[in-house]
Image (cartoon, rainbow, N blue to C red):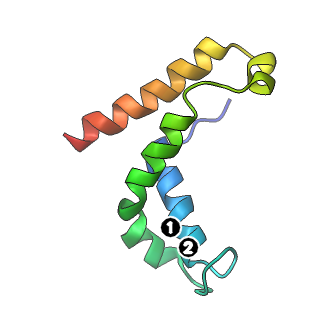
Amino acid sequence: MPQAATPLVERIARVLAGYDRSANADGSDSHAARDVDSAWRDYQGHALAILRELREPDPVMAAAGDPGIWSAMVHAALDSAENRAK
């Protein structure tokens, strides 16, 4: 299974920054990549809030796999983000 090289919190923050800026989403910039590169850190708090909400899988997700593994993975992403912030 492929694995991302970028931490999950950063990836979520970049999506949120891109959504606000990119003309492909809710923004107006047709070339938002550079702006996202400089702004994603402003969205880390939002990304962490999203991850905290996702700690427990919903019933459909739980039926598809092991809820304990899901929870452990999300907690690992949160712990990693908190350790990098120190």
Does 81 sit left or right of 85 as displayed? Answer: right
Which corner quadrant of the image does residue 34 belong to?
bottom left
Quadrant location of the N terminus in the rendered image: top right
Q: Residues within 10 Å of mark 1 (few under 14, many from 20)?
A: many
Whether residue 13 is situated above or below residue 6 in the rendered picture: below
Spot occupied by residue 59 in the image (x, y as percentages of width and height): 77, 22
Spot occupied by residue 36 in the image (x, y as percentages of width and height): 47, 71
Q: Looking at the image, how many numbered discs can be counted on the residues?
A: 2
Spot occupied by residue 45 in the image (x, y as percentages of width and height): 38, 52
**What residue is pinned by disc 2?**
20
Spot occupied by residue 70 in the image (x, y as percentages of width and height): 61, 22
In contact (CB < 8 Å): disc 1 and disc 2: yes
Quadrant location of the C terminus in the rendered image: top left
Of the pair 22 and 5, the residue shown nearer to us: 22
Name the residue located 65 percent from the left edge and 76 percent from the top edge. 26
* Residue 55 is at least partly visible in this image: yes
* Residue farthest left in this picture: 86
* Residue 6 is at least partly visible in this image: no
Does 71 sit left or right of 47 as displayed? Answer: right
**What residue is pinned by disc 1?**
17
Residue type at the position of mark 2: Asp
For marks 1 and 2, give the CA distance. 5 Å
Query: The residue tagged with tag 1: helix, strand or loop?
Result: helix
Query: The residue tagged with tag 2: helix, strand or loop?
Result: helix
Does 61 sit left or right of 84 as displayed? Answer: right
Whether residue 74 is situated above or below residue 33 in the rendered picture: above
Whether residue 46 is situated above or below residue 35 in the rendered picture: above
Q: Residues within 10 Å of mark 2 (few under 14, many from 20)?
A: some
Name the residue located 52 percent from the left edge and 75 percent from the top edge. 33
Name the residue located 58 percent from the left edge and 34 percent from the top edge. 54
Whether residue 11 is situated above or below residue 25 in the rendered picture: above
Residue type at the position of mark 1: Ala
